[in-house]
Amino acid sequence: MSHILILDIGKTNKKAFVFNEDYRIVFEKSDTLPETTDDDGDPCEDLSSLTSWIEKTVEELRNQFHISAINVSAYGASFVHLGTDENPVCPLYNYLKPFPDDLKKQFFNIYGSEEKIALETASPVLGNLNSGLQLYWIKHRKPLIFNQIKWSLHLPQYVSWVVGRKIGWFDDPAEVGSDLTSLGCHTMLWDFRKNDYHGWVKAEGILAMFPPISNPPKGLHDSSAALIPYLTTFKEPFVLISTGTWCISMNPFNDEPLTAEELAQDCLCYLSFEGKPVKAARFFGGHEHEEGAKAIAKDYGLSVDFYKYSNPSEAGVSYIDFYDAMDAYSNFMKKLVEKQVASTRLAIGKSAVRRIFVDGGFSKNKAYMQLLAEAFPELEIYAAEVPQATALGAALSVHAAWNPQPIKTDLVRLTKIT
């Protein structure tokens, strides 16, 4: 039986998964690599350690399994810049690195207002989280580095480049190139109205640094990859609410242009692996829940996961304290879900969505799921479970290239909320 190896590169954990032809995980591992600092003293990914991890992992697993294909999912807003000798010419700058205010002002004075550029590129103004602005910063603040750059690869494509060029996995290394899911996710590089690179990219002489766009993709932005199991399994319009620290409502069936009002409410668009726009809206729901639960727990002398218990004896507290805390939690959750509903309605827009799928932490939170179902009585609400959705999505995106079997219909497990 053939297998596919997926390298799933997060900021904290570097993971490897081997799937069989039924898309069942037959091997997985996770490692944490220490950070280093860049040439300004700011923390960043240790590119040398990451590259070594990739090489060792691929060699280890290709000797254990019949690996027919390799693909990559990785975090976005991060570039690796290669010189003519095909070695990195600078550190992998962290997207949390502060962006200079004067340079930001200079950019928008030249190319248009923040609102104009943000609408054209479907990208809220986020500093270095707009990876295109990282290149602008290098050009204008580190010209010696800029002049050495031959290729600028988003991190998923760099990992694929290591697999293809340095390890020699791909027969044709030139197949590794740019990818729409990385270019089209809050980068300020892609003009959604023209379906092409934005004019400023060409004006700054940056376009030549991007290799041709690969099809099928060799390396995916992780948020886009996580949507693929749902797109593969379900054809009727849906919204996926991916819940974690951020709660992100993703609608691949909303093709309405982004408006200034939506942009101001933390709504954006990105490109799917098929090159289609996905309307997405987010709010800091997981973080708010964590802080709110901590505060209630402190007030009533409970553990931070008190809301998971069904009675006072399980929680180890008095009857009064437990039920007072649960009342406070219920009121807190009503306000939290009100924010979720407002965010999700932005993503829904006027599209003919019939179902909402919720994955991640909140899919197992009964209060959240019940309140969400009450808020959307016209829609079907499901708790969804997809083991390692990001890695699975990366594998599915290249299905035709390695897997002779039809894709199974049971990849997503659903529980309807009534």
Image (cartoon, rainbow, N blue to C red):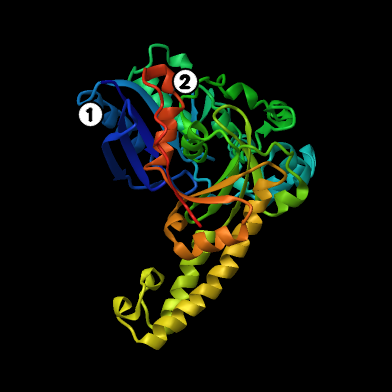
Residue 387 versus residue 170 in the image, above or below: below
Q: Give the x, y percent position of residue 6.
A: 36, 31
Quick one: 149 or 249, which is closer to the camera? 249
Task: Say what amino acid the circle numbered 1 marks.
Answer: Glu
* Amino acid type, callout 2: Val
The residue at 57%/32% (across/down) is 272
Q: Can you tell which quarter of the image residue 1 is in? A: top left
Residue 61 is situated, as x and y percent measured from the top left of the image, at 24, 28
Task: Check the image and report above or below for 415 versus 75.
Answer: below
Mark 2: which secondary structure? loop
What number of labels is visible?
2
Q: Which mark is residue 85?
A: none
Residue closest to the eye, 388 or 118: 388
Instruction: State the separation of the CA atoms marked 1 and 2.
Output: 22 Å
Tell me the residue that label 2 is attached to.
176
Task: Estimate the x, y position of residue 100 in percent, counting from the top left.
Answer: 64, 49
Q: Is residue 33 visible?
A: yes
Judging by the rendered image, the residue that carries numbered circle 1 is: 60
In the displayed structure, does residue 81 sit left or right of residue 193?
left
Residue 332, image x, y percentages: 54, 72
Q: Is residue 219 above or below residue 68?
A: below
Note whether residue 47 is visible.
Answer: no
Residue 165 is left or right of residue 221, and the answer is left
**Left or right, 20 with reference to 272:** left
